Amino acid sequence: MRLLVRVRPAHAPESPADRSATLARLVDAASDSIVVTDSSGRILAANPAFLSLVQVDAEIEVKGRSLPDWMVGSELLDELIPQVRRQGIASRRAAQLRRPGGQRPALVEISATC
């Protein structure tokens, strides 16, 4: 189980822009791959760890594409989305991500939340 905790002084007011910038820095610095999708699985954002895993140079190369484009077998996403809608979370499901040039897929665990 992982827990994300943010500690800051109680007297320090924070704007929505400050919160967004802080969240972006945390996601970008994470060693785990993080992908944000819409409800159909289309990629809205991906952190550098995900880009490295699928071996692309820039986020623009994955943005707008469907997450199943990167997965070996799209049935996992077909199972995850309804589970997340019902329970709010799906965790630690084995999956494989495609890599360019016919390389062996990357073995990963996928967790999702809404």
Image (spheres, helix red, strand yellow):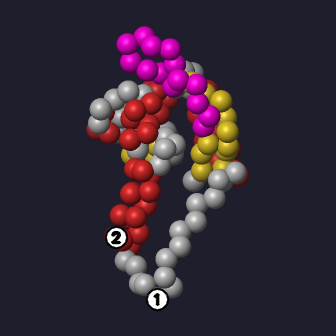
| Residue at image point 67% right, 44% down | 90
What residue sits 62% from the left and 42% below the top?
Answer: 111
Which of the two residues, 63 or 32, is positioned nearer the viewer here? 32
Q: Quadrant of residue 57?
A: top left
Q: Position of residue 61 (x, y in %)?
A: 31, 33
Where disc 1 sits, the SS reads loop
Q: Is residue 73 left or right of residue 9?
A: right
Please report the residue visible at 51 percent of the width from the left and 43 percent of the height from the top: 32
Q: Is residue 95 magenta?
A: no
- Camera-side mark, 1 or 2: 1
Q: State which region is magenta.
A: 97-110
User: Is residue 44 shown to the viewer in this render?
Assistant: no
User: Percent from the top left, x then y, of residue 89?
Assistant: 66, 50
Residue 11, labelled with which disc? 1
Label 1, label 2: how far apart the Cα atoms are: 18 Å
Please state which amino acid type lies under the numbered disc 1: His
Residue lying farthest to the bottom in this orientation: 11
In the image: residue 111, left or right of residue 59: right
Bin the neighbour count of mark 2 within 10 Å (Cα to Cα): few under 14, some 14-19, many 20 and up.
few
| Quarter holding residue 73 | top right
Residue 17 vertical position relative to residue 33 in the rendered view, above or below: below
Q: Give how far across and how far down residue 1 sits, in percent.
A: 70, 51
**Disc 2 target residue:** 17
Looking at the picture, which amino acid does disc 2 mark?
Ala
Q: Residue furthest top?
A: 102
Q: Is residue 80 left or right of residue 71?
A: right
